[in-house]
Image: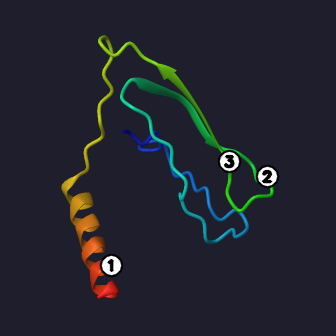
Amino acid sequence: MLDPRIGRGFFSTYNANNFLLRWPLDHMFSSEHFGLNEIERLKDIGSDHFPIYAKFNLENYTRTKRKVPKLKQKEVEKINEEIEKAKEDEG
């Protein structure tokens, strides 16, 4: 499954009630059979989560294959460091 946000910006969905503490808590994924036409965070609707609008289209899989984004080595190292730090904090 692919995350359509990758390469398209930061879409914080939570906490709509706090301007300084927002992060992308909610996710949507698609298989490689779908292409993304549009994605945007919509305005506050009174919830503590922002709504997300996404428009997908079904692509001809035999004709068009989406490239799965690859992490850079520095990104992998940072993720591994964060995992080890979280393990240390738990233990």
**Reading the chain from its start, which is encountered first: label 1 or label 3?**
3
Classify 10 Å Cα crowding around label 3: few (below 14), some (14-19), many (20 and above).
Answer: some
Residue type of the residue flagged with mark 2: Ile
Residue 9 on image: x %, y %: 50, 47
**Label 1 – label 2 distance at C-alpha:** 34 Å
Residue 43 on image: x %, y %: 75, 49
Residue ID for mark 3: 51
Secondary element type, mark 2: loop
Residue ID for mark 2: 45
**Label 1 – label 3 distance at C-alpha:** 30 Å
Residue 75 on image: x %, y %: 27, 59
- Disc 2 + disc 3, Cβ < 8 Å: yes
Q: Nearer the viewer, residue 75 or 33?
A: 33
**Reading the chain from its start, which is encountered first: label 2 or label 3?**
2
Residue 18 on image: x %, y %: 70, 70
> In the orientation shown, which residue stands out farthest toward the right?
46
Residue 58, placed above or below residue 43: above
Q: Quadrant of the C terminus?
A: bottom left
**Reading the chain from its start, which is encountered first: label 1 or label 2?**
2
Q: Quadrant of residue 22?
A: bottom right
Residue type of the residue flagged with mark 1: Ala
